[in-house]
Image (cartoon, rainbow, N blue to C red):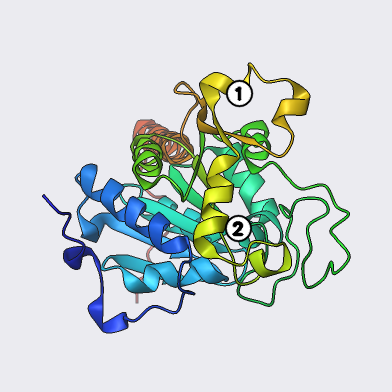
Amino acid sequence: MAFDYATWLRPEMMPHIWCPGCGIGIVLKSLVRSMDACGWDQDTIGFVSGIGCTSRAPGYVDMNTLHTTHGRALTFATGLKMAKPSSNVVVMAGDGDSAAIGGNHLIHACRRNIDITLIIVNNEIYGMTGGQFSPTTPTGSRAATAPYGNIDPGFDLCNLTIAAGATYVARGHVGNGVFLERLIKGALQHKGFSVVEVMSNCHTQFGRRNKHPDPSELVTFIASNAVALSQWNKLTDEEKEGKYPIGVLHKVANRPEYCESYHRMSEHAQQRVRDAARKIAEAESMKPKTEPAGGHQIED
């Protein structure tokens, strides 16, 4: 039976602004299907974005949505989760929004292990703001700010988030939406900070500068460089060059979740205050009661 997207979308916000062939639509569909498979009520979901092409995604879906400033999506999402721990909080961000201006917030969200799912759509360039190179742009690739080729080494976002403390880290690509849906569902169901990196296409800004102007060809190229995790460790370093592993790369179940730790600490602190107040009251009640000293009455 076909999936009913209508109940999850805001038709009055259509048509969307993404370029024809953009991979973000595939990511959004996989995310919505995953939320539905988890049985999530739309009223319990907080969907947050920052700035960039991905930032438009919350505007098209019917749930509680928040469009924030550049690089700050995780800080707003953290506040939302802390204020209402029962909510299901999801962030969507690009490689620039999450790893450049938002990089500091990214590593600390990983470190805290707060129960938020971050979907990073990695198209290896700043797509919306003019095609500047990003922290994940491959060395040698061209960008608006690297017309002769990028000389910086790119971040491996999965390795970065694993090292920073995220407890669920996975990677997929827009060439296989069914597999991507499975990875995202696992992230949504995980208790702790989850990261799903999605290798995606930006044929408008990245592709036309790097001999991949056709969206379908670029998606095929991205998919051709993906290697199942079971095969990745069998490759030599030379064979790994230009390729990347996909699947659940890291999962830890025994680390404390930040909201739960915070509220335990808060309850402990409040209990100490209540205990101290009780002891003061008991001490006051045990003091001997004496009549106030009387003075001489002056008669007329």
Name the side, left or right, on which 136 lies relative to 288. right
Q: Earlier in the sequence, mark 1 or mark 2?
A: 2
Query: Residue at the spot x=52%, y=50% of the render?
Result: 220
Amino acid bearing label 2: Asn
Residue 192: % across, % down: 45, 36
Q: Quadrant of residue 296?
A: bottom left
Q: Secondary structure at mark 1?
A: helix
Q: Nearer the viewer, residue 104 or 296?
A: 104
Residue drawn at x 84%, y 66% is: 146
Residues at marks 1 and 2, CA–CA distance in whole angstroms: 22 Å
Residue 59 falls in which quadrant of the image?
bottom left
> Furthest-top residue in view?
234
Crowd around label 2: few <14 · some 14–19 · many ≥20 (10 Å):
many
| Image height of 113 relative to 91, above or below | above
> Residue lying furthest left in this view?
1
Q: Amino acid at mark 1?
A: Trp
Q: Which residue is mark 1?
A: 232
Q: x, y (%) of residue 247?
A: 48, 31
In this figure, which residue is indicated by the disc labeled 2? 123
Of 173 and 264, nearer the camera is: 173
Which of the pair 258/51 is nearer the observer? 51
Instruction: Find out whether the residues at labels 1 and 2 contact each other: C-beta distance under 8 Å.
Output: no
Q: Is residue 74 visible?
A: no
Q: Position of residue 280 (x, y in %)?
A: 43, 37
Q: Secondary structure at mark 2?
A: loop
- Inspect this view and state whether residue 48 appears: yes
Residue 225 sits above or below residue 300 on the image? above
How many numbered dots are placed on residues in this image? 2
